């Protein structure tokens, strides 16, 4: 089975259910043609009379309702175009990384009249330019855009959060039509939903289906959940809304499971409650909180229980506790079985994540665990996950740490920085603290948190040596950086426009 995480985004390098009841009118046959004709006239009269008494035909009522719903929702759905540069590994050239211009399109939802739009982070990943096309029914004043219908607006990326795969854009416009976020906890299996977006680049499209699952986990050991639907979702639908019959957003269409590359009836959307939480944090604080207590865990399976001789074959097992974390300081240990959070039973990772998510930073999470034959209760402080990039950015000054050719602020790797970072491959290097500008080269370039080891094969052991190596290059030279990113080595290829 093929998982298209980014499959609902086109890339080019080359509330409630509705039941229908249809009445059937049976007319008896008569022996003579005259009687038969009379019977038909009577039947027609009865049918007409029934429609007058009961209103429109149920099927027509349903069709009209869908038309009205689509008309109400469509103006708040946008098409998103992003362009940038990245490495493209061609299957036919498996040993060659091709540096190419990337263009992609997806969908988005206007969630605030002053120009806030939500989409998927993977729709705008690596973008250097983002533009938004409003629905053709949307008019905005000429003073805002220079034209009044179907405008293509420049968009600013406010934040892209990879953990939730949500991104928020801002366009300079006011008075835009918006969609309301529903409470996704109220979703029910079998509920009728519609998916809006631009599948395969075909803007302003809609498909219909039902909620197949209200909380689908793709990985049983991951807390991430999706709303599953059989409404047709294809590449280009990413970031578009999944709405209920009230026209309220129940999710953002995100990915599909497929063997063919197209829709096979298994579409997945990020629940609306997740969208609301992230959006509120972005608007109020400018960033997203990711908090926890400092442990990693997995679901207990019969095989795991047998191998470790556990007393139960379901539940959640603690695999590790982070040294110095609240979990470690409070006394939790690898091998403990989590029984409950806030007195609510925990049977899987999803329930554990939801239980911990209900606590705010600085509150104490109440856990009950099983250790051998003991049952122990703990109150563990909930803390914000360490913002390493934020701490790095606090250490820089533009004059001393600026590397203008790459558009970054950098720090020499030393004993002060090593404790902040995960174990590294090399004892030397330059740490990217922040991006300041686009730089002089075309390409995504190094990202905050990257550690640069080599420039075109030459070791880089300080910010000064990085600057010197860049200054020694000819203006037409291609630049290849070897960086460590999230524990893996990568080549970052940059070119000039000359």
Image: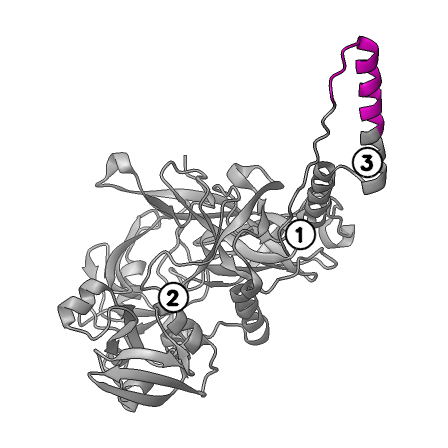
Q: Nearer the viewer, mark 1 or mark 2?
A: 2
User: Which label was assigned to residue 76?
Assistant: 1
User: Which label was assigned to residue 223?
Assistant: 2
Q: Residue at x 53, y 40 (%)?
A: 199
Q: Nearer the viewer, mark 1 or mark 3?
A: 3
Q: Residue 178: x and y, percent?
A: 68, 57
Per the image, the residue denoted by label 3 is: 50
Quadrant of the drawing holding the C terminus: top left
* Picture layout, residue 37 above or below residue 484: above
Earlier residue among tags 1 and 3: 3
Q: Is residue 103 visible?
A: yes
Q: Secondary structure at mark 2?
A: loop
Mark 1, Cα crowd under 10 Å, few <14 / some 14-19 / many 20+, is: many
**Closer to the camera in the image, 335 or 188:** 188
Segment colored magenta: 28-45
Earlier residue among tags 1 and 2: 1
**Closer to the camera in the image, 237 or 485:** 237
Q: Residue 146: x and y, percent?
A: 74, 48
Instruction: Locate residue 428: give its quadrant.
Output: bottom left
Q: Are marks 1 and 3 in contact (CB under 8 Å)?
A: no
Q: Residue 466: x and y, percent?
A: 28, 65
Quadrant of the drawing holding the N terminus: top left
Distance, label 1 to label 3, CA atoms, is 38 Å
Q: Residue furthest front?
A: 31
Earlier residue among tags 3 and 2: 3
Q: Residue 309: x and y, percent?
A: 15, 73
Q: Main secondary structure of the magenta part?
A: helix
């Amino acid at each position: 089975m093929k998982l298209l995480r980014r499959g609902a985004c086109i890339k080019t390098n080359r509330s409630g259910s509705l039941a229908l009841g249809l009445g059937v009118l049976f007319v008896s046959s008569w022996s003579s043609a005259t009687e038969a004709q009379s019977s038909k006239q009577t039947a027609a009269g009865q049918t007409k009379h029934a429609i007058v008494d009961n209103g429109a035909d149920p099927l027509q009522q349903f069709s009209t309702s869908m038309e009205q719903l689509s008309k109400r929702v469509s103006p708040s759905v946008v098409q998103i175009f992003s362009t940038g540069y990245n490495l493209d590994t061609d299957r036919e050239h498996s040993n060659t990384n091709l540096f190419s211009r990337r263009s992609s399109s997806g969908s988005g939802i206007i969630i605030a009249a002053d120009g806030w739009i939500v989409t998927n982070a993977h729709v705008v990943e690596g973008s250097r330019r983002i533009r938004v096309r409003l629905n053709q029914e949307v008019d905005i004043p000429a003073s805002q855009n220079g034209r009044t219908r179907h405008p293509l607006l420049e968009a600013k990326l406010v934040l892209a959060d990879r953990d939730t795969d949500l991104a928020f854009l801002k366009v300079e416009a006011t008075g835009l039509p918006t969609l309301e976020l529903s409470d996704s906890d109220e979703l029910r299996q079998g509920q009728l939903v519609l998916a809006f977006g631009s599948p395969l680049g075909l803007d302003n499209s809609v498909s219909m289906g039902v909620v197949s699952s209200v909380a689908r986990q793709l990985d049983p050991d991951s807390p991430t959940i999706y709303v599953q639907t059989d409404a047709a979702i294809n590449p280009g639908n990413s970031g578009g809304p999944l709405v209920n019959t009230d026209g309220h957003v129940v999710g953002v269409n995100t990915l599909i499971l497929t063997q063919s590359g197209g829709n096979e009836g298994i579409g997945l959307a990020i629940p609306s409650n997740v969208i609301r939480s992230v959006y509120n944090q972005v608007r109020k604080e400018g960033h997203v909180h990711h908090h926890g207590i400092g442990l990693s865990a997995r679901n207990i399976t019969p095989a795991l229980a047998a191998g470790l001789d556990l007393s139960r074959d379901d539940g959640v097992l603690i695999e590790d506790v982070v040294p110095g974390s609240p979990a470690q300081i409070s006394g939790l240990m690898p091998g403990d079985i989590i029984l409950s959070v806030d007195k609510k039973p925990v049977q899987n990772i999803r329930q554990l994540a939801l239980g911990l998510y209900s606590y705010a930073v600085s509150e104490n999470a109440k856990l009950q665990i099983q250790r051998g034959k003991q049952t122990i209760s703990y109150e563990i402080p909930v803390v914000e996950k360490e913002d390493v990039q934020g701490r790095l950015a606090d250490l820089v000054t533009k004059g001393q740490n600026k590397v203008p050719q790459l558009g970054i602020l950098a720090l020499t790797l030393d004993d002060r920085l090593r404790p902040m970072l995960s174990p590294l491959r090399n004892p030397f290097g330059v740490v990217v603290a922040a991006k300041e500008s686009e730089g002089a080269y075309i390409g995504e370039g190094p990202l905050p948190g990257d550690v640069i080891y080599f420039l075109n094969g030459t070791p880089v052991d300080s910010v000064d040596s990085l600057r010197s190596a860049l200054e020694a290059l000819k203006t037409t030279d291609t630049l290849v950086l070897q960086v460590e990113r999230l524990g893996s080595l990568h080549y970052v290829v940059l070119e000039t426009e000359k």
